[in-house]
Amino acid sequence: ALVTTTEMFRKAYSGGYAIGAFNVNNMEIVQGITEAAGELKSPLILQVSAGARKYANHTYLMKLVEAALIENDIPIALHLDHGGDFEICKSCIDGGFSSVMIDGSSHSFEDNIALSKKVVEYAHAKGVVVEGELGQLAGVEDDVKISAEDAKYTHPDQVEEFVSRTGVDSLAIAIGTSHGAFKFKPGHNPMLRFDILDEIAKRLPNYPIVLHGSSSVSPEYVKIIQENGGRLADAIGIPEDMLRQAAKSAVCKINIDTDLRLAMTAGVREVLYQKPEVFDPREYLKIGRANIKTLVAHKIVNVLGSDGKA
Ligand code: G3H
Ligand code: 13P
Ligand code: NA
Ligand code: ZN
């Protein structure tokens, strides 16, 4: 059965590592991620965005994850990524998810509290945990474009009040990460505000923090995509040493989607570009799936430190 993130986060916090939260949309992505985590005995969070749910359908995703639970002997949580309103959270809670995010970060502080509290009350009554968010990530989030200059870091002064008034089980914060493949401008040094993270961790002792927008945008996959007809100039991610540092801290959940997209696309492009005669989807999807497995294994061992913790 699915588990919540409660036990995962408690152990990750005290053990100085983080759990990877990987976005899923289809069978090959679910298989690549769960095979890597299964072999490495790593706890795992699979997360589904509103867009993923629209693309694949709630039931298909649910059943794919149920299949992964049968095939792999590890704890898996199924999480709604960036729930935008009460209704989608309710629908995922009623539909069997073990965790939901209510992303009220674009609302005022008071509206975010009211919305998050309402989701927590509904979720907790059904044994489901809730992630809230305070502060806004740079880049594209919820169709709102926020320029890097306007990045609104989380205010440490607000976190205690937010967590105590809402009852959220974990908190996503903004310290300089952003969604997508273009996180920093070329020529600008990637920078995360570890000082803000430290201050937040001080205000919320033993409390699990979540980092969104944490793909590294590996040059290896960008290169394969570009060499095989793709266009991805100036793609820049979060350096892995920064993520390792974060994983050792109060950060217990690290969200990765873009790196999966790049790994899948690199594999599919490579086959279709190099072998134009191929038209069996299995021939290119299996290379994409293998890339995802390699990528997730690398994250678990070299970035998250969650191997052997299942
Ligand atoms: O944070 C966003 C995730 O990468 C999901 O993206 O809304 O395009 O599925 P999506
Ligand atoms: P990336 O775009 O950096 O992979 O972030 C994914 C994410 O935060 C999903 O919620
Ligand atoms: Na940690
Ligand atoms: Zn996110």
Image (tube, rainbow, N blue to C red):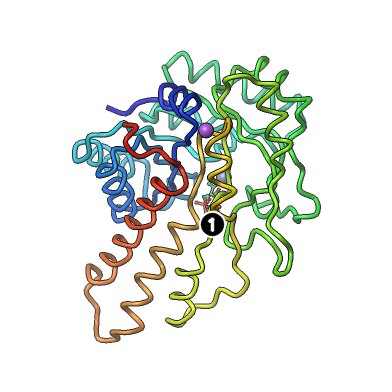
Is residue 186 rendered to the left or right of residue 95? right
Is 174 above or below relative to 213? Answer: above
The residue to which callout 1 is attached is 216
The foreground one among 150 and 307 is: 307
Residue 303 place in picture, x, y as percent = 47, 47
Residue 27 place in picture, x, y as percent = 29, 52
Residue 152 place in picture, x, y as percent = 77, 43
In which quadrant is the N terminus drawn? top left
Is residue 73 rendered to the left or right of residue 217? left
- Identify the image quadrant of residue 249: top right
As helix, strand or loop, the secondary structure at mark 1 comes to loop
In which quadrant is the C terminus drawn? top left
The foreground one among 137 and 294 is: 294
Residue found 68% across the figure and 57% down from its top: 190
Is residue 265 rendered to the left or right of residue 162? left
Residue 147 place in picture, x, y as percent = 76, 56
Is 39 above or below relative to 124? Answer: below
Q: Amino acid at mark 1?
A: Ser
Residue found 69% across the figure and 42% down from its top: 175
The foreground one among 127 and 253 is: 253
Residue found 32% across the figure and 49% down from its top: 30
Neighbourhood count class around disc 1 (C-alpha, 10 Å): few under 14, some 14–19, many 20 upward: many
